[in-house]
Amino acid sequence: MTTSVAAFYVHKPGPDHGGMAPEAPPGLIWGQGTPGAIEPFTTVNRASLYMEVNGTADESCVWMKVAEDGDANDWVRLVSGVSNFVRTNVSGTSVAEVDLRTVLAGTSGTWNSTLFVRIENPATSESTGYISAAEFEVSTKNTSGSPLTYAITLNSILAATTNHAQNAYIGLWDYGTATKLMSNIFGFPGHTAIPATQSASALLSSAATDQAITHTIKFMVQNVPYWILCSNASPAA
């Protein structure tokens, strides 16, 4: 979609907006193309709305101004269909771009989640490559620091007086039929070949010799405990 070269007021904030108002009210504008670095995009106040009348079908056609830096990046498309939200120059002691919290009250249901995400691949879909309900990516380009880096961080704060035997950081539920189940717990599609030699740093490598078991990782399958066998000795030859 091209950048807008002209936009027009549906509602233009007037100079008389009440003596008690702290500033001019937001505006309501419309036009064709995505927001540009031109008036009235650059002059209306934050929280103004822009309606993109020739936007892509089935995508949101409403934009909101979220900053007042005088450029097109001041505007973000409101969530619906495909939406991108990019914010830069975030700093602070600790930063959470999106902080969601659900507080349960009374008798809750059989399951509760703060965030539920689903992607559906209908019978008429011709999707290729891969599909996933959620995808996370961490990108570090600053070589001066040395932070711990995780694509996903899972925290647990349990205050219950009794511990459920199947409590876990990750729960795996399969609702497919007997012939349509997930066949692997995880996969490494990016690895075309596993290195033939042992390595202490590679994510996957061959092990030509036996390793002494020093630790185990516990998991549950239908209330039955199992353990993954581990070793703290380097597999490097």
Image: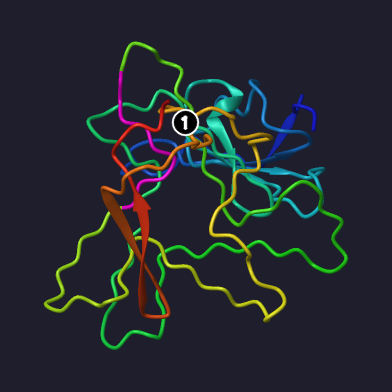
| Identity, as a three-letter code, of the amino acid under mark 1 | Ala
Q: Is residue 143 left or right of residue 147?
A: right
- In terms of depth relative to the viewer, which is nearer, 84 or 147? 147
43 w.r.t. 23: above or below: above
Q: State the residue lying farthest toward the bottom.
A: 107
Hey, which quadrant is residue 217 in on the image? bottom left
When the figure is inspected, residue 36 is found, relative to residue 80, above or below; the finding is above
Q: Using the image, determine if residue 22 lies above or below residue 183.
A: above
Q: Residue furthest front?
A: 209
Identify the secondary structure beneath mark 1.
loop
Q: Quadrant of residue 144?
A: top left
Residue 134 picture location, percent across and down: 56, 52
**Residue, x 49% and y 35% (percent of image)?**
203
- Which residue is denoted by mark 1 in the rendering? 67
Segment tinted magenta in the rendering: 146-154
Is 152 one of the magenta-colored residues? Answer: yes
Front one among 132 and 38 = 132
Q: Position of residue 184 (x, y in %)?
A: 59, 60
Q: Quadrant of the C terminus?
A: top left
In the image, residue 37 above or below residue 216: above
